[in-house]
Amino acid sequence: MKIAFTTSDHVHINAHFGWAKEIDVYEISDNGYEFLETLSFDGDLKQDGNEDKITPKLEALADCTIVYVTAIGGSAAARLIKKGVTPIKARSEQEEIADILNKLVQTLKGNPPPWLRKALQQKSQSFEDELEEEATV
């Protein structure tokens, strides 16, 4: 599964979702994790009330399961959840990406909490599975 982090230094989770110029994406499993890419965003990202600024981020994160942020607006969080992406607030701007990734790997090896199992199930369904389910209803 893919996990994303809003970051300004590629070490800490230290950027507001709407203002983030970069979001690092990792692939994670119970075997470990690997860095995939840094998503970059331009424009006036600090302009409050500009909902258009988050649309490219929502599209870029559509295949992620979780995105870690320091802060996120209510409408952005709702739009992420609607796309099946769970936003999670970091405890502080000092929280390190590697620490979170290591904890998630350990969690996946054991018994993931219900919210994580649900997020994993949502992402494991392919578009074809969803169409098939709709056809049988």
Image (tube, rainbow, N blue to C red):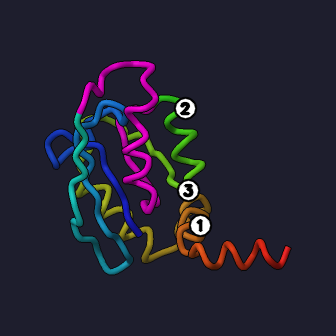
x%, y% of residue 27?
A: 32, 69
* Magenta span contains residue 62: yes
Q: Secondary structure at mark 1?
A: helix
* Callout 1 crowding tier (Cα within 10 Å): few <14, some 14–19, many ≥20: some
* Callout 3 crowding tier (Cα within 10 Å): few <14, some 14–19, many ≥20: many
Above or below 54: residue 36: below
Pick the quarter of the image with the C terminus. Answer: bottom right
Name the amino acid type tagged 3: Gly
Q: Is residue 127 left or right of residue 131?
A: left
Label 1 close to label 3 by CB (< 8 Å)? yes
Residue designated by label 2: 75
Name the amino acid type tagged 2: Ser
Residue designated by label 1: 122
Task: In the displayed orientation, state which residue is furthest to the top.
Answer: 48
Residue 25 occupies which quadrant of the picture?
bottom left
Name the residue nearer the viewer: 85 or 108.
85
Name the amino acid type tagged 1: Gln
Residue 129 occupies which quadrant of the picture?
bottom right
x%, y% of residue 84?
A: 56, 56
Pick the quarter of the image with the N terminus. Answer: bottom left
Segment tinted magenta in the rendering: 43-72
